[in-house]
Image: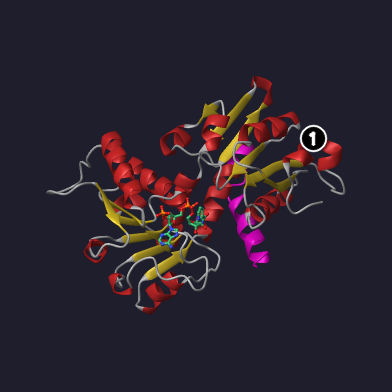
Amino acid sequence: MKDVYTLADLENREILDQGADKPARLAVIGKPIAHSASPVIHQAALDQLNIDSRYIRIEVEPGEVENAFQKMAALNFIGCNVTVPHKLEATTACNKLSEDAKAIGAVNTVTFDCENNLTIGHNTDAPGLVLAIREDFSVDLRDLKVLILGAGGGAGRAAAIQCARIGCDQVWLANRSVDKVERLAKQLTETYGHSEQLQGPGDRFTPISLDSSGILETVQNVELIINATSLGLKASDPLPLPRRGIQPFHLVYDMVYQPPVTSLIRHAQEIGARAANGKSLLLHQGALAFENWINVLDANEPLASMRRGLEKNKP
Ligand code: NDP
């Protein structure tokens, strides 16, 4: 068994399942992929439900996503997850998209319907975020004024579109490269219009440069700060926004979950703000993905097993 498989391993079952006690029937594709926590959570759920399948990691090059899907479907895979950098490419490599995947413009979960020759793309990151915010802060995302740091990246963009879809009143889209969020704000305004709830003047979607001094004023108007930049992955990373911007009334959600306490979370907690890391998003998007593949009758599953699996395999 390997930690990371390649497309060459998908030639036939003999190669793929060599040395394994169960057939590989689910996977996560990406590049790099060795760090992915998806096998830990999905395998825990498969084992708990006595499903005779392995969940593996497959490293796939850009441009090879459709090929990967075809090879997995030919080997009778149930489906797969898709991660960086393939979430966009997967939208064209599928021949059917769910409403969530269409709206977000990205696919993180695929189901293979071999009987009807369908490769169906879903997006569980977006609804997963709503569940994560509810779990960590006991509030509905749609009721909050939100600042998304890194809204020009894949995860931040998905969060911004989800906020627009569910009716958040005001969303500030902050990014280092401001051109990306200027385009996104325009697109969201065209598609989702202006909020009926919005009182007085002001735009529903406001782009802002992460480096501008205006960010300090902006942050005073928001209730929820989401960090969707990659800052926080390394201990030496600076905070994604100036320290004095964060106030005790803020809810701070850092999508980074490793390390579990980022500098942003530590600072927020030190000044008395409520803060949470991206573990809840990892779990909820994973549980929703799993439910696309396997009919689970127990209301606590697969989330409970995934949570235990992650806890047991803490790095
Ligand atoms: P992307 O590479 O698509 O986006 C990265 C974002 O970070 C961009 O907005 C980029 O800005 C910004 N950024 C990178 N470096 C800096 C810097 N030095 N200063 C300021 N901004 C910076 O990555 P993803 O969107 O896929 O992931 C973003 C984060 O979210 C990662 O930390 C990832 O681990 C986490 N994540 C967590 C998930 C979970 O389940 N909890 C799921 C998905 C992601 P620019 O556009 O200017 O380059």
**Residue range (magenta):** 291-315
Give how far across and how far down residue 219 sits, in percent: 27, 63
Q: Is residue 75 left or right of residue 29?
A: right
Q: Is residue 278 left or right of residue 144?
A: right
Q: Quadrant of the C terminus?
A: bottom right
Q: Is residue 52 left or right of residue 81?
A: right
Residue displayed at 50% across by 39% down: 88
Specify the quadrant of the image occupied by residue 194. Answer: top left
Q: Nearer the viewer, residue 41 or 237?
A: 237
Say which amino acid is labelled 1.
Glu
The residue under label 1 is 11
Q: Nearer the viewer, residue 51 or 15?
A: 15
Label 1 residue SS: loop
Decide if residue 217 is in sight here.
yes
Q: Nearer the viewer, residue 60 or 142?
A: 60
Q: Is residue 300 magenta?
A: yes
